[in-house]
Amino acid sequence: MSEVKSRILELRNLIIEHNHNYYDLDKNLISDFEYDNLINELIKLENQYPEFQDQNSPSRRVGGGLSDKFNSESHIFQMYSLDNTYSDTELETWFNRIVKLIQVDDFEFCCELKYDGASVNLLYEDGQLVRALTRGDGYQGDNITNNLKTINSIPLKLKNKFFPNKFEIRGEIIIPSDAFNSLNEKRKQIGLPLFMNPRNTASGSIKLLDSKEVARRPLECFLYSVVSNDISINNHSELLDSARNMGFNVPNYEKVVKGLDGVKKYIKYWDINRQNLPFEIDGIVIKVNSIKYQKKLGFTSKFPRWAISYKFKAQNVVTKLKSISFHVGRTGAITPVANLEPVLISGSTVKRASLHSFDQMNKLKLRVNDSIFVEKGGEIIPKITGIDNTNRGLEEDEIPFPVNCPECNTKLIKLESEANFFCTNTMNCRPQAIGKIQHFVSRKAMNIDGLGDETIKLLYDKHHLKDISDIYNLDYDMISKIEGHAEKSVENLKNGIEESKKKPFQKVLFGMGIRYVGESASKTLINQIKSIDELKKLDVEYLSSIDEIGDKTANSIVDFFKNDLNLDLVNRLISSGLNFTQVDLVNSSHSLSNLIFVISGVFENHSREELKSLIEKNGGKISSSISSKTNYLLAGKNIGPSKFNKANELGVPVINEVSLIDLIS
């Protein structure tokens, strides 16, 4: 059973990491197919071993994330992901499931192109655009209204009214292929780095802080779905036509077909002809056309049962391997990256490809000038999938994995349980030290504004930042003399650092970057221990007995506190005033007297029990269900969709844990 638990925890950590790379960093290190396999394996194990279920598991969530750059607001209706399929057999299984549920086998599908962009949700009231949100976590998104108002294909005022006074319309922000190439050509001419691909560029553009810069990007918005309780249209295809007539940019590529044969013909056609489109797609979306049947089929916690995505196989090409670079990550892991002869894949030029780990590199035994097969995993990040054995480099040019760290020359080690080699010089190896500081100041940890990646590198190289404790002893006069650091930005940095001292213990623990101690593990630990001194004393046996803390995490925590350098670091952070104890939330007042709260979701800073106790000690009452008598829905991440929708129907205010504290104080 311990092996099952460890695998479940490993899968959750892997999926969370890939979600962070894709949604927050606009990177994708694995293909959609590989990602779906991880998700499916996790779901299977969680169903088979329900004792290891966790309401915060990534198997229960839409993948996206929220940014600290914008205010987050709630979608009126949850934004769901689409389940993916990769074969006719899987498509037939989905079709048979629908037939069984609606007891009808003669119905229409609406087939559409799956645009490869950034998802957005637009809210219209009385024919006017009033709000634009990113997908976020499916329940809440970042308010990027000012940025999206700069996109000409998004109507600010509708020319006709077919829908009710208030509705949401969903779509994708994309950059057409020719416009993307022109954008990169202009950047090349003025010496700026080139953008990687249209999808990443579109996603990054809508999150820029300067809307004038957003306006300079050749962005378009393709709409594909309207959501409201008051639409009386019978079919999805009719809904798309109505959206077009109102002035929305709905590309005219959809086709209504009967039965799976029509669906398969549509898929086959676009698999062959997608290269001729003026924009990128990564598959086909198939929807039951009847709105009545859609309502009958409903939703799972993540997906609509009436729609599915058929993903195309990634394009695979041959090119030459020139060399391999070895990158050192925050944890000391050495990642090989292949440098290639430039090759065009799916509309963009590829010069590098991921090898992920020593094990993969060792298996391939790559040589300089090998002809290799390269695939764009998920149509974004390329990876090496094999070697053309008929066209290999010289045997003596096989590329060895380094014995010593390429950055600091420390001898590398490899643990049996790991796919990578590691540099053990955790304090003085430049990429590790910089990576640890970057992690510490990140939004999900201490959230310190003013310490961007480049500033951290600059301060490290000038010997003003050696580790995270130095953040609290910076010489602000010195920083103000660095180019680009005006008085106002230095003042903001100083305020951000001082504000970080108020962060709760869980944030500090996560920010310290103990290996395998991610967000979820940090929350779990602080529910069991009350201080860093208590954590230092725990052994592997006790730690691994805590739910969700596997053997690898337990060993990592114990090893961390065995290291005198780490203990010294913790002591310096304590001296700087950081919070290393779990603060008792409970006050006692009458500020919430006679107010009724419903609590739903997973919370960032406090457990549900802490929040419940806080409400009750301040005169409030807890209810398990929402009614007209409910005063507030206290919502965290992964909030139950039925409660969320019910609150919106009844006009019950939805607040987060920060707003709750404001109500009390």
Image (cartoon, rainbow, N blue to C red):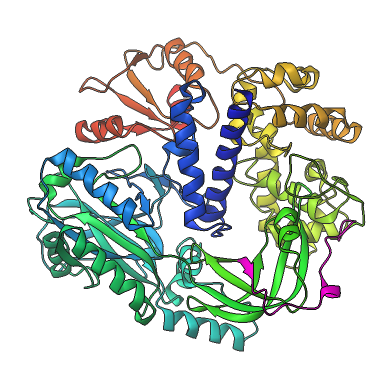
Q: Is residue 177 above or below residue 287?
A: below
Q: Magenta residues?
A: 384-406
- In magenta segment, residue 398: yes
Q: Position of residue 27 (x, y in %)?
A: 56, 59
Q: Is residue 311 above or below residue 575?
A: below
Q: Position of residue 338 (x, y in %)?
A: 70, 69
- In magenta segment, residue 23: no
The residue located at (24%, 68%) in the rendering is 265
Q: Position of residue 497 (x, y in %)?
A: 70, 43
Q: Is residue 174 above or below residue 493?
A: below
Q: Quarter of the image holding residue 584?
A: top right
Q: Main secondary structure of the magenta part?
A: loop
Count of marks, rendered view:
0
Q: Quadrant of the N terminus?
A: top right
The residue located at (34%, 33%) in the rendering is 654
The answer to whether residue 107 is left or right of residue 425 is: left
Residue reaching furthest to the bottom: 189
The answer to whether residue 360 is left or right of residue 317 is: right
Residue 621 visible, this orientation:
yes
In front here: 331 or 134? Answer: 331
The residue located at (15%, 44%) in the rendering is 229
Q: Quarter of the image holding residue 373?
A: bottom right
Q: Position of residue 628 (x, y in %)?
A: 20, 23
In front here: 613 or 329? Answer: 329
Residue 65 visible, this orientation:
no
In front here: 374 or 446? Answer: 374
In front here: 207 or 171? Answer: 171
